[in-house]
């Protein structure tokens, strides 16, 4: 069932992306100061300016909606509707001049992600997902590819550094069973999975603003996305994520990751 507010809020989500893109393009490949946050991740004026702009638009148009953003935290998170924002998912790529980052915009209704956008403003690519509807890239419907065996699967993760302690061994055990393993991409890796160019993304140490926008995008493209136990993702998930382009892959990945 598509709720009667879906079209309105989806259009507004696209307005947020339309507004953020020019800000990012203005700062891309320029000399800028890179600050380090307490968690040792980088942040720039572009990250902050984009999130501030999106928050101001939400406050203006939907003052009763909550917001959870990477740079400026939580506000009214108990609201029926909650916007989850990552102004630049992949700041390291952004500051390195690589156009494989993205702006992530998601809307949660009663705690469940119902709208998701991955926007790559340099390449002018935008993936749009809405619960119960197909996913579109720049107006064209997309779908994942078929790959039911790990031996033929292409696996991606942003960085081996995200796997701490025993997570690294678990990930390597999976990687050894796949055809190829690549690193890099942040949200762009998930976008490539939605388009059918790779088969698996497995990551750890993610925050809600890193993964919630991905849920509608991937589901609408035919993928499954869960935590490492196969459970659906929500605000309280632990940051371990599996995305499988072919539904037959997910239980196999869960089994390998959780093998004793």
Image (cartoon, grey):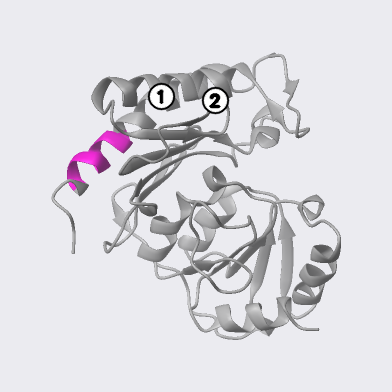
Point out residue 100 in the picture as x, y percentages from the top left corner: 60, 42
- The residue at the point 24 percent across, 38 percent down is 11
Point out residue 113 in the picture as x, y percentages from the top left corner: 38, 53
Q: Quadrant of residue 9?
A: top left
Give the number of marks.
2
- Say which residue label 2 marks: 72
Cα distance between the residues tagged 1 and 2:
9 Å
185 lies above or below 95: below
Mark 2, other Cα within 10 Å: few <14 / some 14–19 / many ≥20: few
Q: Return the residue found at the far left.
A: 4
Residue 94 appears in view: yes
Lateral position of residue 28 relative to residue 67, left or right: right
Lateral position of residue 199 relative to residue 167, left or right: left
- The residue at the point 74 percent across, 66 percent down is 181
Secondary structure character of the magenta stretch overall: helix
Element carrying mark 1: helix
- Say which residue label 1 marks: 55
Quick one: label 1 or label 2, which is nearer the N terminus?
1
- The residue at the point 59 percent across, 54 percent down is 189
175 lies above or below 249: above
For the record, the magenta segment spans 7-14
47 lies above or below 30: below
Relative depth, front residue between 246 and 105: 105
Residue 178 appears in view: no
Point out residue 111 in the picture as x, y percentages from the top left corner: 39, 52
Which numbered disc covers residue 83?
A: none
Quarter of the image for the N terminus: give it.
bottom left
21 lies above or below 196: above
- The residue at the point 63 percent across, 57 percent down is 238
- 9 within the magenta span: yes
Q: Mark 1 near mark 2, Cβ–Cβ under 8 Å?
A: yes
């Amino acid at each position: 069932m598509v709720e009667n507010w879906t079209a309105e809020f989806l259009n507004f989500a696209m307005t947020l992306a339309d507004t953020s893109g020019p800000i990012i393009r203005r700062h891309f490949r320029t000399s800028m100061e890179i600050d380090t946050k307490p968690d040792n991740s980088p942040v720039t004026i572009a990250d902050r300016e984009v999130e501030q702009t999106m928050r101001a638009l939400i406050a203006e148009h939907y003052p009763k909606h909550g917001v959870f953003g990477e740079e400026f935290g939580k506000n009214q998170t108990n609201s029926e509707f909650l916007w989850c924002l990552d102004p630049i998912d992949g700041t390291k790529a952004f500051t390195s001049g690589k156009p494989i980052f993205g702006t992530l915009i998601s809307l949660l209704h009663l705690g469940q992600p119902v709208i998701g956008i991955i926007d790559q403003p340099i390449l002018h690519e935008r993936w749009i997902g809405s619960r119960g509807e197909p996913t579109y890239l720049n107006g064209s419907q997309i779908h994942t590819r078929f790959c039911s065996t790990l031996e033929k699967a292409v696996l991606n993760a942003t960085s081996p550094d995200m796997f701490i302690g025993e997570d690294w061994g678990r990930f390597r055990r999976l990687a050894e069973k796949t055809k190829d393993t690549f690193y890099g991409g942040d949200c762009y890796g998930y976008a490539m999975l939605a388009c059918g160019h790779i088969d698996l993304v497995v990551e750890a140490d993610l925050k809600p603003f890193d993964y919630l926008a991905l849920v509608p995008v991937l589901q609408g493209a035919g993928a499954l996305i869960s935590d490492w136990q196969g459970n659906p993702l929500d605000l309280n998930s632990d940051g371990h994520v599996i995305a499988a382009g072919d539904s037959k892959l997910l239980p196999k990945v869960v089994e390998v990751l959780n093998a004793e």
